[in-house]
Amino acid sequence: MILNDKILVLDGISGISLGKEIEDTFRDSDRNSHYTAANDMRRKTFYKPVSEIKKAFHKHILDEDYYRNPKITNSSLIKLIEKTQPQTVFVIGFLYRFFDLDLIAELKIRYGFKLYLYDTDSCNLYTNKRELVYFFNKELPLYDHIYSFSKTSTQFINKLDGLNATFFPFGAKQISVKSMPKEHDVLFVGSADMRRIFLLEQLTSFKLSVYGSKWLRNQSVISSSLNSVITSTSVWGSELHQLLFKSKIILNITRSNFYGVETGVNLRIFETLAAGGFLLSDHCDELGELFSIGKQIETYHCAEEMADKVKYYLQHEEKRVKIAQNGYQHYLKNYTWKTRMEELLSHF
């Protein structure tokens, strides 16, 4: 890629800073870049009622198995491309929920830009076959190349005719690590699902803290001891960093559908290491390919092993601190966004 080529980062994932951090890294590397969050663009008038009508039409009249009415007006997308004149459009997550895919294909031909995807969320679709098939058949063929956070997804995509994907793990924003009093023995940050509830119930005898969304709607199936340590609020950025600094053990529990397909190299892993934290994650083979288990991070295979390792590393501070330090140094060498994006740009 020529240094002055314009890169448009088109963020299809709302509520997290991933896309903005990537675009900031492009800017810091003197790349000509522009960031737009799809969720902030102008939405269609009467979107919800019109969507219901269109879905019914496509299902009952056209006999389509799945239909998604995109949220964003065609005119706002056209204006964005005309204004930014990108040579490369780098999509974070997906397009189909926001944009008319036929229009994307037309604009790609008209303006001659390359279209790349950073697949950050395909595993979330594995429990919804109709939507997954729609995403794979309608959107993925538009891309010149796909970069996926998941080795499982990468292998899956590469088995489909005409699609090409590369396993490309996440990174994390480099921050100034601070030494703070450890207020939390065990910290979990993430939204509720039943697998997470089941595992966290095994840790209520420890000084546990839980932050994230969707916990209140699951109160009826959560014990009072677990409910008492939950703050049902999403945390990102500096607030998340403060929590990581103040925690002895940061627990990673992948979602049920991720765990079911043996993938789990999620963003929390890299955020934890960037903060100099001690990471205890559920095990998947992908982790062993990226990190030295027991030296840079720790993993568990079941609820009993998780609880045993929490107890062990709370009692053996010197080992816990040493692993956290090793993990941080490994992150600095391999997984800052600067390092990750330099590798990515070499592919373009």
Image (cartoon, rainbow, N blue to C red):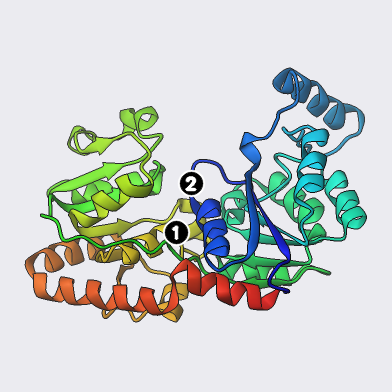
Q: Amino acid at mark 2?
A: Ile
SS of the residue under disc 2: loop
Residue 109 or residue 285, whichever sits in front = 109
Question: Closer to the observer: label 1 or label 2?
Answer: 2
Q: Residues within 10 Å of mark 2 (few under 14, many from 20)?
A: few
Q: How many marks?
A: 2
Label number found at residue 16: 2
Residue 199 visible at all: no
> Compared with residue 227, is residue 133 higher up or lower down, i.e. above or below?
below
Q: Point out residue 265 in the picture as x, y percentages from the top left corner.
A: 46, 65
- Residue 326 in sight in this render: yes
Q: Amino acid at mark 1?
A: Leu
Q: Measuring 18% from the left and 77% from the top, which residue is drawn there?
A: 322
Q: Is residue 277 toward the left or the right of residue 265 in the image?
A: left
Single out the residue that lies furthest toward the left: 315
For numbered disc 1, what is the local secondary structure?
A: helix
Residue that carries the numbered disc 1 in the rendered image: 267
The span from disc 1 to disc 2 (Cα, nearest Å) is: 10 Å
Q: Residue at x 79, y 47 (%)?
A: 81
Q: Position of residue 234 (x, y in %)?
A: 38, 39
Query: 10 Å neighbourhood of mark 1: few (<14), some, or many (≥20)?
Result: some
Image coords of residue 85 (percent x, y) = 79, 53
Q: Is residue 299 left or right of residue 149?
A: left
